[in-house]
Image: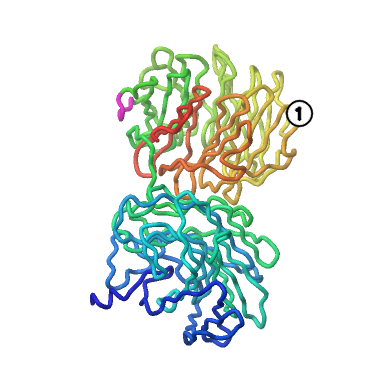
Amino acid sequence: MAAAAAQLVVTPGGVRPRSLVHHVEPEHVLDESDGRIRKLDAAGVPKIDFGPLPRRPGPGPLLSAARAPAEGLTPALGHGWIANSAWENTTGKPVTRFATTWTVPPEPRTRNGQTVFLFNALQNSTMIYQPVLQWGPSGAGGGEYWAVASWYADGQDGHAFYSTLVRVSPGDVIVGVMTRADAADGRHSYACRFAGIAHTILRIGNVEELTSCSETLEAYNVKRCTDYPHAAGTAMRSIALRTGSVSPTIDWTPVDGVTGCGQSVSIMSNSATDGRVDLHYRLWNPWRSLGSKPSASPAAVSWGPDRLDVFQRAADGAVLHKWGDGAHWLPSPAGWESLGGSITGQPTAVSWAPGRLDVFGRSPDGTVCHKWFEGRWGPSDAGWEGLGGAVEGVVSAVSWGPNRIDLFARGTDDSLWHSWWGGSGWGRWESLGGSIAGSPAAVSWGPNRLDVFCRGTDDGVARRSWDGTRWTDWERLGGEVAGSPVAVSWGPNRLDVFARSRDGSVLHKWSNGVGWGPAQLDWESIGGRVAGGVSAVSRGPGRLDVFAPGPDHAVYHTWFGASGWGPTDSDWEPLGGKIGGTVSAVARAPDRLDLLARGVSVGVWTRAWTGSRWSPA
């Protein structure tokens, strides 16, 4: 057994006998013209015949999930494909170019003889073709360092071929590229290389079409989570795919094969010209727990730079409250005070002056309930007042000045309803008409000014405005959105609206008081790959921060400032965590952001931007 195991080597695509792993020189070609696989020299003369190439026809690609351990190797935390994205080319035109850019990650903190592979790949039912970054030993050589080579391997322990292995360093930016040459008689020829890195090219000719695409984390002999690179993950970015001469429509499928350390894949962008897939090595959760077991997303509000109030719904429907004074969480780090009540869904909170809080919820009978704080809780510590109405979804509350609150909600008749506090009493609910889905988003950019945005039943967005004397007619803003829109203002006559598109990216449009950009019915995409509600906040003129959960339940962030959208026009910054629902984002100072979210498993979690970094770091 020991002798047999010693003959096995690790390669992309599996563990196989050393005798089946072969080096291919840059000037040589692997050829499959007559059902056998041969290495040809530059003149086309056969140099080595490796025998018949097995054919394994099947309904799908090889290696779409993690493989079982090979005999003689007993890894503790995964063996084979750990996490990957998959896309099958069914366009009828062959893939002619597939390129991916990524950055060589930091070295692992521990060394246990592990091998880690990162690559983009093309496959058919038998073979896999890939430019591979590796840490650790493989059949091509290597050791406790990063190196790159191109590979062409049987996916079921047959022959594997590799180019020269070239050492690289953490922080290096590498680009793996596969291209297809002209084909004849249904056969295809390809070249694989790392752009700008000599001797990494591997050519294959007269092969069965490679139709399955992937971005993959593969590993062997991982015994501890710290055997993975010392990073949260690696972004496989600037993904560019062509079929024939066009960029196809792509819909990556995430596959989480092994999750013992929190490994996963996130589809950040399905773009065929600038796509992104994030491969995570571990559960990254640099968030601080505030305790409790919320049943919905929390609501947060600030009435001063050193004050933050958070509200959540408990399992029994009561509203719980805690607050931060800039130094401590009260009533204790994990404790909450009960405000009583019985609500369904998410609470809503607003402040119109220092020391003043107003909290709203939807009662089980569909009416709206309210309590307030001004030195003490009213109408009593555990009591709530009823405001009537017959509503669905989340109530939207906004204040444009002292003693002024406006409430908006979707009625049970699917129209928009409005009520208000003017300092001496609540106005009766009035219908503003429309036929809406989801919950409305209300914003004020100045005294006696209100704008309300709703998703219509046609999935487009529409707006009604209070101009100081009257409600304007409904204004169509176009779009095809999923979920409710969100709106924010950073100054007079400035409105920014965000919504999740049907493909999971985030759409944006804006108004400067004169017209809508990019056009009345058009929206710009700011990228992302989100799987929940979008949140937006402004902490100063010309500054926007947008947050949303990704398919991996982590929080992602993009921002707008003097130099445009960051980190890029389409990339989002990962902030970790594992959340359910929507992020509540609060700007309590120009250099301070607070994020609150409900954890997937338990607890309310928080993370803050302190002006120079995220805390916890």
Q: Please state which of residues 292 and 265 is positioned toward the viewer in this rendering.
A: 265
**How is this picture coloured?**
rainbow
Name the spot of residue 542 as percent of width and height, x first. Answer: 63, 28
Figure quadrant of the N terminus: bottom left
Q: Please state which of residues 604 and 573 is positioned toward the viewer in this rendering.
A: 573
Name the spot of residue 286 as percent of width and height, x first. Answer: 38, 39
Q: Is residue 167 left or right of residue 421?
A: left
Q: Is 336 within the magenta?
A: yes
Name the spot of residue 246 as percent of width and height, x first. Answer: 69, 62
Residue that appears at 40% across and 79% down: 20
What number of labels is visible?
Answer: 1
Q: Is residue 488 shown above or below 119? A: above
On the image, numbered disc 1 is attached to which residue? 514
Residue placed furthest toward the left: 1
Q: Which residues are the magenta region?
A: 332-337
Q: Please state which of residues 452 and 573 is positioned toward the viewer in this rendering.
A: 573
Name the spot of residue 546 as percent of width and height, x first. Answer: 55, 36
Residue that appears at 55% across and 33% down: 545
Q: Is 474 within the magenta?
A: no
Label 1 secondary element: loop
Identity, as a three-letter code, of the amino acid under mark 1: Val
Q: Is residue 434 shown above or below 335? A: below
Q: Is residue 53 left or right of residue 416?
A: left
Residue 512 figure quarter: top right
Q: Is residue 231 left or right of residue 487?
A: left
Q: Is residue 89 shown above or below 310? A: below
Figure quadrant of the C terminus: top left
Query: Badge 1: how crowded within 10 Å, few (<14), some, or many (20+)?
Result: few
